[in-house]
């Protein structure tokens, strides 16, 4: 394997200059980490203090060119993401900012793991060891899925992933190999398997802000779904969250009941959406981001055309679902899922940064993961039963239809006359036409569910979905083909300057 080196903390510090850097929170004198409370405090920094919603959303087919600019410090970055260019600025919501924050989180996790080891891995420390391992795995998982090709057992052994940091840095220049995608996935799995059994919910004051048991199982469910070669494990970890063969409606967002009363109050709607008391939210991560302010009003985002196609169409369940939850007027539309808040640099300061909370794992995602596992086993009845539960929490007076699957097939093969893009995962040759139809429907409904949350980008990568981005007031467009190398984010310029090989273009 070729060796590619990078100084993780130095690069993170450069990216985060002006913000609260990792080193401002974790002093170089590691002897201060001598008890459980110190480890617990350190692990607050083991979650990336940056969010990926703008990246995933603007690069995806959920974004359109609306021709009207929002004056914003990240307007250039948003445009560059929309056209899949190398981003030339580094600030909140940019690729380099997310990269740096992920590695800062990894550094905090590694220092916590070292401190726990030094203190003897005592029983009271083991839950925090589990949390640190899950945090380290999660940050690397997000990194490899933005900066590496999607997992494919036939190619991932040679494709470049990201450096997997497993030891604390104690020197100014610490170098790392750029591991292959397979090596990164294997190390993530190792951390997941070791860390998950150690997680205990009763050690946290607010469990939803940490890798609690349900969030850890949701992460494992996503990991094996993205890998695509262990569907029994997808079901196992999904069942650990939703229950096996049970009514899991209590885990789903109740749009007709809980959310609809706030349909005319977007601020309260957004607060409810990211609230730790919402059963659907399994893990909530807060970070520096303008997305709560810019999601609906930047030039590139949800347009009337996108809203009509994604939200209003594909209504085979007769569910006028999120239509009443769209706010704005032409050409700007938004679903208020994020409440921006201001994080001050220090008490009494009038300086700081705009932040937001993001539900990093939800019960709905786990449900969709399990549906994909059902697809692989031709368990269509189970999928339909789950969809009936899901749609009953998305519309008033929902009536289950015994012909639901027939209507799905009719929609794609007759209404669309079969002219729809088949999902193209690495295991496509294992799928018959019914499986492809159902997988397509699951993917399309998931697109609606997570609109403006950046999740669509990962489906675009793993299913090789082409994306066509229009240029306002012209017949021109930019096409991201199924195997376009721009699907893999370019390594941040500062990392390249430190010697890490850029991704091919």
Image (cartoon, rainbow, N blue to C red):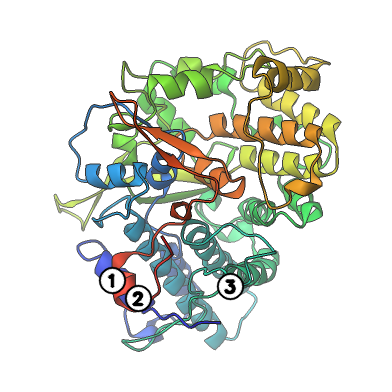
Spatial CA distance of label 2 from label 1 is 6 Å
Q: Quadrant of the C terminus?
A: bottom left
C-alpha span from label 3 to label 2: 21 Å
Q: Secondary structure at mark 3?
A: helix
Disc 3 to disc 1, how far (Cα)?
25 Å
Q: Which mark is residue 13?
A: 1
**x then y, percent, for residue 108:** 43, 72
User: Counting other residues with Cα less than 10 Å from the Cα at mark 1, is it few (<14), some (14-19), or many (20 or more)?
Assistant: many
Q: Secondary structure at mark 1?
A: helix
Q: Residue at x 58, y 67 (%)?
A: 181
How many residues crowd around disc 2 within 10 Å: few (fewer than 14), some, or many (20 or more)?
many
> Would residue 407 appear left or right of 38 to someone viewing this image?
right
Q: Residue at x 45, y 81 (%)?
A: 176
> In terms of depth relative to the viewer, which is nearer, 368 or 151?
151
Res. 139 mark: none
Residue 274 appears in the picture as rendered: no
**Furthest-front residue in this view:** 475
Which residue occupies the foreground of this view, 170 or 92?
Answer: 92
Q: Nearer the viewer, residue 396 or 407?
A: 407
Is 70 located above or below residue 52 in the figure? above
Q: Are marks 2 and 1 in contact (CB under 8 Å)?
A: yes
Q: Which residue is mark 3?
A: 129
Residue 6, position as x, y percentages in the image: 38, 78
Residue hosting label 2: 9
SS under mark 2: helix
Query: As drawn, is 132 to the left or to the right of 289?
Result: right
Residue neighbourhood size for the residue with mark 3, other residues' Cα within 10 Å, grouped as few (<14), some (14–19), many (≥20): many
Mark nearer the viewer, 3 or 2: 2
């Amino acid at each position: 394997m070729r060796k590619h080196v990078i100084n993780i903390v130095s690069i993170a510090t450069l990216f985060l200059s002006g913000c609260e850097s990792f080193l401002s929170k974790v002093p170089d004198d590691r002897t201060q980490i001598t008890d459980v409370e110190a480890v617990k405090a350190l692990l607050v920094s083991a979650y990336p203090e940056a969010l990926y919603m703008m990246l995933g959303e603007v690069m995806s087919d959920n974004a359109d060119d609306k021709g009207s600019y929002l004056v914003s410090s990240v307007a250039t970055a948003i445009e560059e993401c929309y056209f899949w260019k190398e981003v030339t600025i580094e600030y909140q919501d940019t690729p380099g900012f997310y990269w740096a924050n992920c590695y800062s989180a990894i550094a905090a996790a590694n220092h916590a793991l070292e401190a726990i080891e030094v203190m003897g891995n005592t029983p009271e420390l083991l839950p925090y060891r589990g949390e640190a391992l899950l945090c380290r795995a999660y940050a690397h998982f997000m990194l490899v899925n933005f900066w590496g090709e999607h997992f494919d057992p036939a190619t991932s052994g040679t494709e470049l992933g990201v450096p997997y940091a497993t030891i604390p840095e104690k020197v100014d220049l610490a170098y790392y190999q750029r591991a292959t995608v397979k090596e990164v996935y294997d190390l993530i799995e190792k951390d997941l398997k070791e860390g998950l059994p150690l997680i205990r919910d009763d050690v946290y004051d607010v469990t939803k802000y940490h890798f609690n048991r349900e969030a850890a199982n949701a992460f494992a469910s996503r990991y094996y779904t993205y890998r695509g070669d262990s569907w029994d494990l997808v079901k196992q970890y999904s069942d650990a969250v939703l229950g096996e063969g049970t009514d899991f409606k209590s885990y789903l967002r109740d749009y007709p009941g809980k959310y609809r009363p706030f349909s005319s109050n977007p601020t309260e709607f957004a607060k409810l959406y990211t609230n730790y008391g919402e059963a659907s939210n399994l893990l909530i991560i807060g970070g520096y981001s303008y997305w709560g302010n810019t999601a609906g009003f930047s030039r590139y985002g949800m347009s009337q055309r996108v809203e009509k196609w994604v939200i209003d169409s594909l209504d085979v369940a007769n569910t006028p679902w999120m239509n009443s939850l769209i706010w704005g007027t032409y050409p700007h539309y938004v679903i208020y899922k994020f409440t921006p808040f201001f994080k001050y640099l220090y008490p009494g300061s009038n300086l700081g940064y705009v932040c937001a909370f993001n539900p990093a794992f939800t019960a709905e995602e786990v449900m969709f993961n399990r549906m994909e596992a059902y697809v692989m086993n031709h368990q269509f009845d189970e999928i339909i039963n789950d969809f009936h539960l899901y749609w009953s929490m998305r519309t008033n007076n929902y009536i289950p239809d015994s012909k639901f699957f027939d209507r799905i097939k009719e929609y794609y093969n007759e209404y669309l006359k079969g002219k729809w893009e088949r999902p193209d995962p690495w295991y496509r040759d294992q799928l018959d036409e019914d499986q492809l139809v159902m997988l397509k429907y699951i993917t399309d409904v998931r697109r609606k569910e997570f609109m403006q949350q950046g999740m669509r980008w990962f489906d675009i990568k793993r299913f090789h979905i082409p994306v066509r981005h229009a240029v306002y007031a012209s017949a021109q467009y930019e096409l991201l083909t199924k195997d376009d190398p721009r699907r893999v984010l370019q390594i941040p310029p500062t990392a390249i300057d430190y010697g890490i090989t850029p991704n091919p273009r």
